[in-house]
Amino acid sequence: MAASPEMKAAWQKILNTALSGSAEEVRQLKCGTCAGPLQIVFTPGERASLTVCCAACSAAIALDAGHEAPLWVKSLGPDITTGEAT
Ligand SMILES: [Zn+2]
C-alpha cells in the first residue's frame, strides 16, 4: 500500500510535534491515516526512542528521539494517548 503525499505530510507533522511540540499540541495529535487517537510512548535510554501507534488502524511509526526527553514528557509522562478528554 502506497501512502499518499497528504498522508506522508500528516505523519511528518505528527513526528515533528511528538519530538518538539508542546504538551497541548501533542495531546491534539490524531492518526495521519484514520484520524483516530494515537498512543505515544517515549522510551528513555542512551538511544531514546519515540513510538507512535494508532489503536484504531494499527498504523505505527518509531523514531530516534536523541538524548533528551521531549518537553511534553515532563508534564504528561512518557506514555500518553492523544485525543482524550482531560
Ligand atoms: Zn489510525
Image (spheres, rainbow, N blue to C red):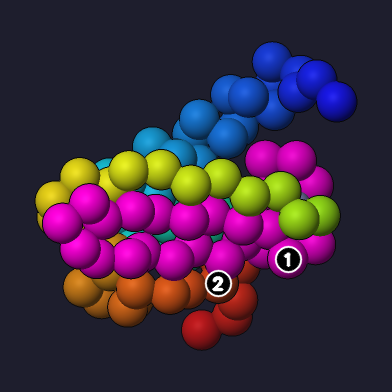
In the rendering, which numbered label is found on residue 55?
Answer: 1
Report the residue that reaches farthest toward the top.
Answer: 5
Q: Is residue 68 left or right of residue 75?
A: left
Crowd class of label 1 (few under 14; some 14 to 19; many from 20; radius 10 Å)? some
Q: Identify whether 33 is placed above or below 81.
A: above
Q: Which is nearer the eye, 64 or 37?
A: 64
* Amino acid at dot 2: Thr
Which of the two discs, 1 and 2, sits closer to the camera?
1
For the residue with label 1, is its CB less than 8 Å from the closest atom of ligand 1? yes
* Amino acid at dot 1: Ala
Q: Secondary structure at mark 1?
A: loop
The magenta segment: 31-56
In the rendering, which numbered label is found on residue 81?
Answer: 2
**Residue pictured at 33% horizontal, 65% vertical:** 43
Q: Quadrant of the N terminus?
A: top right
**Residue pictured at 28% horizontal, 47% vertical:** 65
**Residue pictured at 32% horizontal, 43% vertical:** 64
